[in-house]
Amino acid sequence: MTTQNPPDFDAILDALSEVADPELGVGIVPLGLIYEAHADGATLHVTLTLTSPTCPLGDVLIADVEDALTARFPGFTPAVTLTFEPPWTPERMSPAARAAMS
């Protein structure tokens, strides 16, 4: 168990800002793929989606999220949940992500 204070939503998002969608090369945070992020004791819960339910690299993205959280918050255990409810739409993207995609 860790003696550190659990990170808040913003700190978790900051850690995940280093993770890019492997196909698009754009960060998962500006893409709007993170639906929820919070700490519960020593567990960091992240709920994310993919741009498409048929994305073949979902496992890679989940591993990248787990790696980023483990590297930034040693002593905490990532618990990543993949969901497609609600489905991702381009409206979730930040203006910077939209610019990167055009």
Image (tube, grey):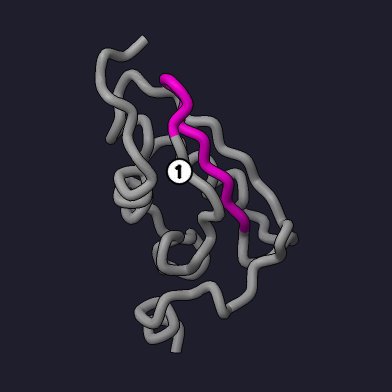
Residue at figure coordinates x 25%, y 20% from the top left: 4
Magenta stretch containing residue 74, yes or no? no
Q: Quadrant of the C terminus?
A: bottom left
Instruction: State which quarter of the image contains the N terminus.
Output: top left
Kind of residue at badge 1: Val
Does residue 75 sit above or below 14 in this rendering? above
Kindly identify the residue that appears in the image at 44 percent across and 32 percent down.
Answer: 39
Circle 1 residues within 10 Å: few <14, some 14–19, many ≥20: many
Q: List x then y, in percent, for residue 36.
A: 53, 48
Task: Please identify the dominant SS of the magenta region.
Answer: strand
Query: What kind of element bears circle 1?
Result: helix
Left or right, 27 with reference to 14: right
- Identify the image quadrant of residue 2: top left
Please name whichever residue, 9 or 67, is drawn nearer the observer in this view of the structure: 9
Extreme residue toward the top, this view: 1
At x 39%, y 53%, the residue is 19
Please, is residue 46 above or below residue 6 in the view?
Answer: below
In the rendered picture of this protein, how many numbered marks are placed on residues?
1
Residue range in magenta is: 39-49
Q: Is 32 left or right of 27, judged from the image as shown?
A: right
Question: Which of 37 and 89 lies nearest the eye of the viewer?
Answer: 37
**How far across and down, in percent of the image, does residue 7 sit?**
32, 35
**Residue 68, x across and y down, in percent:** 36, 40
Residue picked out by circle 1: 65
- In the image, is residue 81 above or below residue 42? below
**Residue 93: x percent and y percent?**
49, 75
The reply to whether the magenta stretch includes residue 42 is: yes
The quadrant in which residue 80 appears is top right
